[in-house]
């Protein structure tokens, strides 16, 4: 039988409570039963001690004194719960008994230990009986047997037993109904979560799960789902923006290349003009190829297909290599490079990802620097971290654009700097490469005062 979540909660709660209730009922029953028997046993012991003072022991004879007065007193008084007394010698022979026993006598059990209390019968009526030895001067002469009716006590115990047995299933059934109702109310927020998530589609991600008033586990679940929905919405928005920007960046050189070729075939042209247009077409192809390569690199990062970069190389040597590869552009813009190292130990970093980071940041510093400007590269160490600061004195970045700087295809004031080539993927690649090795990448900048990029590497890789 399959139960829904609400009924399972109610069932589990009912089973757990049934066990506790059963233990409580058994404890109550045994406690009452023991209390009843204990009171009866105390009464029997008291009566035995009381009547033992009225016993006369003469040689081998044991009998009650003033038995006639005792019999007359019993006739005059109404006894609600009479006590039966009987005297037995060591051989088990009846010596004397209380008048209320009349023709009956109590059963002597030689196997019962002294001072023990037993439950037995007298004329098919339940009684509680005690068997206590009689001693005088250190010698045992026999036993005094005391008994009292147990019918009332047994009736109380049986009534209690029936009451507990009947009330147990009734209590459990009522408890199950109440538990089911309370469980239904408790999982109401879950139903709200189900209803909300069922209405969410790829085109409708702005819906959020309502948060319950109590900050409990369901509140945390709702918050976690809302955060997940927000991350999914952000990812889809980035995907749409990425697709749109990628299409635009690829469409532009293709359109330019198509226009150039269409112009060439309209009429015969001079050799120099053909060469000029072909060179322009090749540059657009190179631009498009570079964009495709960067897009593939970003896609690999997003797909978590990371390169196993176990080869470590000196950070100083890596900076020198990147600067050397761009020496022609640096010389063309007449830039001054200030490279300073403030580390004593060898600073080794993952080669592949660090190359991507430095290549994109240094190329940006070169592109956005004014002719004759200065680029400073500083490597230092702080505790267990290695810091690499790249500072240019170029055009700078608006403060409001800093938060979007590492987004794909984002270029600050791109229309005002049309002569500076690029598609806005370099810094995005640098950021993802930094994340891949657990490095931190940050930027500070002001308009017309340049930008400072800081890369923080962990010393241990």
Image (spheres, helix red, strand yellow):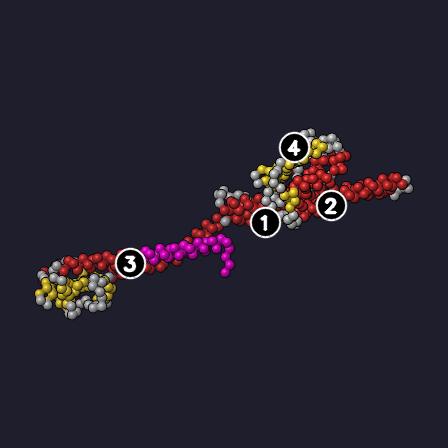
Secondary structure under tag 3 reads: helix
Residue occupied by mark 3: 33
Q: Looking at the image, is 293 positioned above or below residue 133?
A: above
Looking at the rendered image, the disc whose residue lies closer to the viewer, 1 or 2, is 2
Q: Earlier in the sequence, mark 3 or mark 1?
A: 3
Q: On the picture, is 48 further left or further right than 332?
A: left
Q: Looking at the image, is 138 positioned above or below residue 294?
A: below
Q: Which residues are magenta?
A: 1-30
* Residue in the foreground of this view, choosing between 271 and 325: 325
Instruction: Give the image quarter of residue 366.
Output: top right
Looking at the rendered image, the disc whose residue lies closer to the viewer, 2 or 4, is 4
Looking at the rendered image, the disc whose residue lies closer to the viewer, 3 or 2, is 2
Residue occupied by mark 1: 198
Residue occupied by mark 2: 292
Q: Is residue 206 visible in this depiction of the protein? A: no
The tag on residue 445 is 4
């Amino acid at each position: 039988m399959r139960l829904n979540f609400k009924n399972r909660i109610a069932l589990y709660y009912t089973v757990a409570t049934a066990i506790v209730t059963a233990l409580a009922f058994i404890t109550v029953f045994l406690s009452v039963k023991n209390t009843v028997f204990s009171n009866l046993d105390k009464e029997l012991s008291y009566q035995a001690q009381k009547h033992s003072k009225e016993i006369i022991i003469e040689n081998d004879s044991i009998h009650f004194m003033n038995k006639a007065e005792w019999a007359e007193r019993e006739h005059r008084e109404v006894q609600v719960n009479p006590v039966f007394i009987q005297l037995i010698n060591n051989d088990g022979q009846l010596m004397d008994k209380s008048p209320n026993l009349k023709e009956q006598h109590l059963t002597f059990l030689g196997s019962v230990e002294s001072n023990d209390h037993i439950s037995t019968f007298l004329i098919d009526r339940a009684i509680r009986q005690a068997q206590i030895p009689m001693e005088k001067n250190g010698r045992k002469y026999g036993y005094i047997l005391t008994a009292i009716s147990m019918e009332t006590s047994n009736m109380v115990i049986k009534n209690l037993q029936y009451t507990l047995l009947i009330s147990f299933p009734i209590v459990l059934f009522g408890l199950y109904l109440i538990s089911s109702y309370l469980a239904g109310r408790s999982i109401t927020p879950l139903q709200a979560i189900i209803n909300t998530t069922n209405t969410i589609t790829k085109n409708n991600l702005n819906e959020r799960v309502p948060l319950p008033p109590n900050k409990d586990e369901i509140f945390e679940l709702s918050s976690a789902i809302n955060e997940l929905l927000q991350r999914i919405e952000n990812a889809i928005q980035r995907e749409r923006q990425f697709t749109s920007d990628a299409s635009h960046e690829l469409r532009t050189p293709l359109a330019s290349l198509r226009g150039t070729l269409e112009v060439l075939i309209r009429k015969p042209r001079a050799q120099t003009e053909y060469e000029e247009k072909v060179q322009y077409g090749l540059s657009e192809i190179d631009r498009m190829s570079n964009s495709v390569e960067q897009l593939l690199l970003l896609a690999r990062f997003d797909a978590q297909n990371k390169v196993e970069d176990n080869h470590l190389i000196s950070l100083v040597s890596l900076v020198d290599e990147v600067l050397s590869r761009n020496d022609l552009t640096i010389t063309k813009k007449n830039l001054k490079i200030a490279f300073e190292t403030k580390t004593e130990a060898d600073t080794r970093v993952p080669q592949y990802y660090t190359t991507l980071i430095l290549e994109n940041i240094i190329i940006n510093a070169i592109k956005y620097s004014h002719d004759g400007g200065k680029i400073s590269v500083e490597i230092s160490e702080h505790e267990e971290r290695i810091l690499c600061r790249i500072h240019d004195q170029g055009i700078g970045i608006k403060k409001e654009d800093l938060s979007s700087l590492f987004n794909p295809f984002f270029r600050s004031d791109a229309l005002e700097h049309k002569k500076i080539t690029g598609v806005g993927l370099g810094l995005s690649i640098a950021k993802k490469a930094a994340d891949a090795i657990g490095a931190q990448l940050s930027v500070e900048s002001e308009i017309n005062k340049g930008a400072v990029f800081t890369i923080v590497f962990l010393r241990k890789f």
